[in-house]
Image: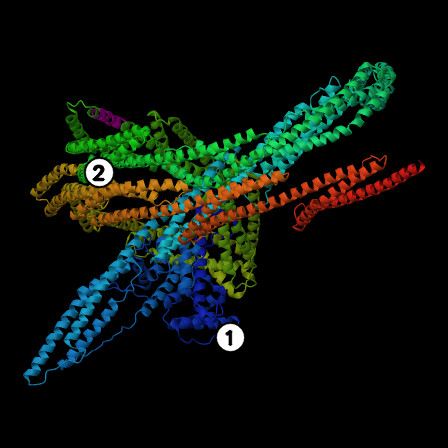
Amino acid sequence: MTTDINQRWGETVQHDIDDWDENSSARLFERSRIKALADEREMVQKKTFTKWVNSHLARVNCRITDLYTDLRDGRMLLKLLEILSGERLPRPTRGKMRIHCLENCDKSLQFLKEQRVHLENMGSHDIVDGNQRLTLGLIWTIILRFQIQDIRVDEEETKETRSAKDALLLWCQMKTAGYNNVNITNFTRSWSDGLAFNALIHKHRPDLIDYDKLQKSNAMHNLNNAFNTAERNLGLAKLLDPEDVNVEYPDEKSIITYVVTYYHYFSQMKDQQVKGKRIGKMVQSAIDNENMIQDYETMASDLLKWIEQTIVILNDRTFANSLQGVQQQLLAFNTYRTVEKPPKFMEKGNLEVLLFTLQSKMRANNQKPYTPKEGKLVSDINKAWERLERSEHEREIALREELMRQEKLEQLARRFDRKAAMRETWLSENQRLVSQDNFGFDLPAVEAATKKHEAIETDINAYEERVQAVMHVAQELETENYHDIERINARKDNILRLWAYLLELLKARRARLEASLSLQRIFQEMLYIMDWMDEMKVRLTSEDYGKHLMGVEDLLQKHQLMEADIAVQADRVKAVNDSAAPFARQDDDEYKPADPQIVGERMSHLEASYQELVALAADRRSRLEESRKLWQFFWDMAEEEGWIKEKSAVLASPEIGHDVTSVNLLVNKHKALEREMQARREYIDGVVGSGEELIDQQHFGAGKIRTRINEVNTQWDELEQLAEIRKKRLHNAVDLYQFFADADDVENWILDTQRLVGSEDVGRDEASVQSLIKKQQAVSEELNNYQTNISQLHDQAKGLGEEERESPDVENRLATVDQRYKDLLEMAKLRKLRLEDALALHKLFTEADGVEAWIDEKEQMLNTMEFGNDIEELEVVRHRFEGLEQEMNAQASRVAVVNQLGRQLLQNQHPNSNEIMARQNQLNSRWAALRELVDAKKEDLNSAMGIQNFHIECNETISWIRDKAKLISSTEDLGNDLAGVMALQRRLTGMERDLAAIQAKLDALQKEADKLAEEHPEEADAIRQKIAQIQDVWQELRVILKKRDEALGESGNLQRFLQDLDNFQAWLTQTQTAIASEDIPNNLAEAEKLMTQHAAIKEEIDGYEEDYAKMKEMGEKVTNGQTDAQYMFLRQRLGALDEGWEDLHKMWDNRQEMLSQCLNEQLFLRDAKQAEVLLAHQEHFLTKQDAPNSLEAAESAVKKQEAFMQTMEANDEKINHVCQFANRLVDENHYAADKIKGKADTIQDRRDGNRKLADDNLEKLRDALQLQQFLQECDELGYWINEKLLTAQDALPEGTRNLHSKWQKHQAFMAELAANKDRLDKVHQNGDDLIREKPETADVVNDRLRQLQEQWDELENTTQSKAQKLFDANKAELFAQSCDDVDTWINDIDTQVKSEEYGQDLTSVNILLKRQQLLEKDVDIKRQQMLELQNQAEVLRNEGSIVDEVDGKRVQVEESLASLATSESVKERFSQLEGPLSERRKMLEASKELHQFHRDVEDEKLWVAEKMPQATSRDHGNSLLNVQTLMKKNQSLRAEIDGHQPRIDEICDRGQAMVSRSHPSSDAIEHQIEDMQNQWAVLIDEVDARKLRLEDSEKAQQYYTDVAEAEAWMSEQELYMMAEERAKDEPSANAMLKKHEGIENTIEDYAQTVHELSETSRNLIAENHPESDRIATRQAQIDKLYAGLKHLAEERRGKLDETLQLYQLNREVDDLEQWIAEREVVAGSHELGQDYEHVTMLQERFREFARDTGNIGSERVAAANEICDKLIDQGHSDAATIAEWKDGLNEAWADLLELIDTRTQMLAASYELHKFYYDCKEVLGRIQEKQQSMSDELGRDAASVTDLQRKHTTFEADIQAIGSQVVAVQEDANRLKCAYAGDKAKQIEQREAEVLEAWNNLNMGVEGRKVKLGDTLDLHRFFNMQRDLMLWMEGIIRQINTDERPRDVSGVELLMDNHRSVEAEINARDESFAECIQLGNSLIERQHYASKDVEEKLVQLKEERKTMVDTWERRWDFLQISQSLHVSFFSSLQYSC
């Protein structure tokens, strides 16, 4: 290979060369680009080979890092070869010297040569020197030898063996065949997307890769996936990196290296999978059957064993816990009976035959017949067989029962699934609902959201019961051990989880909603506060500071209130801010209803406003205080002046009072005024002082202030004088008025006492008279004591002043007081006498009061007693009469006591005897009258009860008759259809039996009525009316029954018509309601659904058209000529039906128009939403773009933007469609035109805005791309310059060994620099253009250009310096070597020119032409080199360098110079080359023309061959659409052939031209032209023939299409006919029946279509169509299908009729069950009465209810059972369901009857219980009444106590009647306690205990009161005795202490006699004293409640007695002394005389 030296001499020579070839720079750039690509490929190979080597060296734990350096020493290379070959190689030489490395490398190369590996131009020194290309070549050679060479794939067709590379490629193609997007044609681009690697792995290990998820566009992912999977799962080293493969042209060798690893791995895996086959044969000898006995025993044993085992299995009752399992067991059981059992039965027969045969043979041989062992006899086998069949029968029954149980569980599970699905859907929807936080942004919206949330909570809480219902179903399944209970529980848990999650969401939403509501309320509060503060600011900035003090004070008060409000608002502001503070925090993650910043701003604004308000308030207060100071003084002075004037007027008043109180009040007021004056003086001084201060401050009103002060001082002095004068006047008036006040008090007391003693009240009873007497005694004592007060009044009058004392008023007042006092004393004496008389009278009347009070009470009760018309009330009254009789027996004894007392009083001749007798007679007469009243009332009660019982029986009879009438009336509905008429006739037949019983009842009532009318004439009219009413009801019943019988025969046809009319009207109303719906669809699905439903309604309306016509016709017939009101009403109904029919069509049309508009609107909204989504995506894309920072990013961004804009253009069609659709809707006056127009305009504006923004972005991205391209060019050039600069800076060699090669390399380097100079210029040019176009980039561009220029200058300088140094180093040697190179080149060129090779094909010819062009260019270049060498030779000669060179080189240089000397010969050699070169060019061009012709002909033949299969295809399509498509393709092919004809003609013309020029290959050319034309003609003929075949196929496919449509229609109808859908109710069954009739009519009409198809098929068959047989078959199928469809229609009609009958029965059964259920509610009621009256009422009502239920229910149930039996007998398909309904109905009826019996018993028991409660309550009430009536009064004296004792005795007699009632209560309680337990028993015991406790308490109270009354009587007797004794002793003491003194002895003796009589009287009283003391001591010993009083009285009595005795003794001593004195005095007188 020669070296170019065309740039050896520097820039001068280079400039010449550039002038010679101006395109050399472009070629050099291309070469550099190719070199860069080659370097890149070498880098990839290096990485791949390094990884490959490491993958093998890893076996010996070795590794290399750099392929070039680590292989230099040869050691790793030897190890690699050992591993690959498996042979032992020579040990490597140790040492690191070059020679050691060369030796090791030689060993490796020698081993390769031994392995017949060809290594061309490669030595060990290349490896040691690290030659990159040769090192890579070595590794590749090793890979080929040891990895690829052994790959062989033999082709089955050609039997050829491909090369290793082709074999590997073929293996890859075979393994990846059929994989999408995988087409391996080479080892470069076919592997770029990574799918081929994934396909290889997936082919052998499909479990590792999911190939279907891989995408061709995601190459990096595919490559990473394949490489990582191979490394991780297959252990294949990752030799390639994805970025090295994902390029345009991956490195072929690297790909092959990596793919080979796949080949070897999968080949080994295949070998390991092939394993040996298992061969096994089992040989089993046949059973030896030589001995028949052994056979029998074996067979018998086996059969018996099988029977026993089978019996055990059959007796097993362990069934599968699932429906399928039980069905499988039942199937297995049936299999046993049909498969397993029959062979055993045959075996049993064979055993009998075998035994018989065996015994026969033995008998024939005169042997003893064989007898089987015990247990194996035939009889034993037969018994076992019977047990088997019995077990079989029992298992069948058990299996079927278990099957029924499992079916019920499955139904329950389906019910659970259905409910669970509904609950899950509901919960999911509500979770979605409560997950939304659309609360609004103001308080009303949030409050509305709160209310909505509360409604949601209410709905959700109400839904809990439904969730619990699902839980109960699941619990029931779990209880029944359902087989799939885990799924049920899982779903149940899921529902509970959803429910809990829903509650959690609901709670969280409630918290968020409350937070939003709180915040909105805070905001509202802030607004209120701000408004208030704005209002306050206006008021605080007012300039009004008051016109006077009141104004200022008012303003200050208002301001104070404002300040208080402001202070209050501080807390409010603080509270609001504190409340808002949590919402303003941004550091937590809690839910924030609003932006915290906004909340904070509002808080700050509120606080600032408040501070401003506070400042304004303070400022205004200071101003108001200054204003108040001025007005306060004037106000104070005016106030003081007014006060002085006011007080002066008071002091000047002449009033001194009119009594003591008023005078004292005036005195006190005057004192208060004096104190007030003193206090006021200080205040006035203060005010004056403030005035003085104002004067001192030189106030502008100082003069007025001084005058005001003087005036006030003067007025104050006058006020003090007036006060002193008034004080004296008041003190004088006090004494006078005090006298009059005391006199008034005395007179008032006298008047009060006078009213008391002058009262006419002498008492109403004894107690009141006693009280009045005591009061009179007190008044008398007070009169005596009041004399001192009269005396004090006279003394006070004397103490008055002289003027007042002598005044007439004082004297008159004293006289009046004295006179009134005397009158009062006289009146007191008279009153005392009157009271003593009244006391005697009242004692007499007290005795009769008790009896008369009781008589008054009972008379009032009897007089108010009324007998109602209610039997229950009469029962209560009768019960009360029984108690009254007992009470009267007790009160009779009291009347006797009263009479006895009266007689005793009359005998005593009481002063009021007349009154006593009158009172006694009155009592007796009233008692007799009470007796008569009670007897009369009792008689009235009995009469009323008899009448009421009669009325009750009459009412029951009337109810019975009316029930029958109702029953007949209730059958009117039964007459509405034929079935009802038949049922009615049966009911009326049974009704006649009941009428006889009613007639008998009527006769009995008539007799009783006659009897009652005679006994009660006053009730005769009512009784006769009742009987008449019964007769009327009876006649009505008979008339109704008669009319009903007559109407039954006429109602048949009319009822059918009315039923049809009712059904039609119901359908019409329902349809009108459905059409009249105002539902507006909210989305497209709803709109389409509504349109579909509306169309279905239209079909239904059309289906009812015929029914409507028939009904009209029937209606005309029915109403024609009828004048009855019912028929007139029917005619009106028909008229309304016509109007409804017309309205229905109008409504349908209106609704159709509305729904069409709604559908269009929803379509527009859907498209608009899609358009908005597109626009939103576009806007998002356009707004999210960033400026690119690299060339790749810029290119990617531009491509992405352009692709996006292309997508926008593609989407513009959708947006235009939306706008056009909107315009069309607006033009059609759509009801939402404005909304649609607005949305369309919005979409249009957004589209235009997006387009403008996209254009702007694209422009910016292109600018950025241009800048990044420039920067990239600068970077690449900069990198290149730096790299070249390093090369240029390499040090020069020290010797001259490689000097020439260095010079050559440097010359090439300099040429490369010169070639890249244009790059620098181009970069400069691009930078200038960029600055000119984009001035904003000037700074960046200029900076980069400056840096590049500096780098380039440095590179050029370095390169020139190095070139000069190399050239100067050895010029002569360089010159010689250059000459040798030129000579060698000329020889090589001469050889090439003489070559005879002109190419074998077009490709090789083109290559030779390119070489020819290069050769011609090299000749020109070498010619220039020769000129340069000549110039160089001249230089060398001139410099004399030859002399200085060494000897060895001198000769060489001289020879070179000699050769140059003969330059003419060199020129001649160059000129000789020109001719051969020109001739060779011509030959190559001619060869190219020939090969080009051959290539074109072959291409056209290939084109014809490619189109020929399409033209000759026999695929004529298998459908009409395919045929039409093929026809279009054939037409396209024909058009393509016509368009390709000019190309064929052009090729033929070129061939003919070559033939005409006598081309050497003319014959071959003509042959090819002819062959091509023949193939072309055949192609055209085939296309025309295919056209005819396709037309025939089109006819057949059209027929097939029509047949398919007919078949599809009939199949659809068949599906409808075969559908198991059943009507949901009776109306839907009628509707389905009518719809089926319409379908049947449609099927009949479709016969014409089938006939037309038949005609078409016959025509095609007649035309001998190729598919005639198939057509005939299809037509036969259609005919058969149509016939089957008609048959199915008939079957479905029968099913629909059965369904209708079933629903009619279901309606009847449901009505009856509902009626039973309603009755069960009443019968099952737990209401047993609240009290006695209530339970009595319930019992009567329930008797009536039970009678009605039994009469009506029995008839209805019997009728329903009759219908069920009839349908079952007819073989109804739902006979089982009907039977179930029948059983359920009968069971419900039986349950109802049982409930009625149960409730009857419960009511009877409740009646007994409540009657007991009632009796207890009544007895307890009487006891409490007696307890309350028992007075606590113990009497005021002995007489009253005696009276009370008498009354108490009467009371004790009264309560004896209650005792008998208490005993009855105890008996009832004992009986009821035996019948009840638990709470009821406790209540009974409690009630009994309450009565007994009350009774005992009453008895104890009575006994205690009796004892107390006795004690009280003793007490009063003691007090009376003690008082009498005390009074007697006081009289005796007064008598003893008399002041009478004896005057003489006789007088003394007389006094002594009197004194002795007193002693006798005292002694006579000793017994009284003893009795009194004994009684007192007895009371004290009994611990009487008045023991202290008794003891005191006893002490007083003893002391007084002792005093009396002492006084008598003293008097007796005195008398004795007096007697002695008088006797002595008399004796002395006598003596004196």
In this figure, what is the number of numbered marks? 2
Q: Is residue 587 left or right of residue 1041?
A: right
> Depth check: 1488 or 1764 in front?
1764
Measure the C-alpha gap from mark 2 to mark 1. 145 Å
Q: Locate residue 119, reporting x and y percent.
A: 39, 67
Label 1 Cα neighbours within 10 Å, binned few <14 / some 14-19 / many ≥20: few
User: In which quadrant of the rendered view does residue 1391 lie?
Assistant: bottom left
Outermost residue, right side: 2032
What residue would you read off at disc 1?
A: 94
Magenta-span inclusion, residue 1145? yes
> Depth check: 1026 or 913 in front?
913
Is residue 1865 depicted above or below 1104 in this figure? below
Screen quadrant of the C terminus: top right
- Quick one: label 2 or label 1, which is nearer the N terminus? 1
Screen quadrant of the N terminus: bottom left
Q: Locate residue 1289, reporting x and y percent.
A: 56, 56
**Observer able to see residue 1514:** no
What residue would you read off at disc 2?
A: 1000
Is residue 1096 depicted above or below 681 in this figure? below
Q: Main secondary structure of the magenta part?
A: helix
Amino acid at pointer 2: Ala
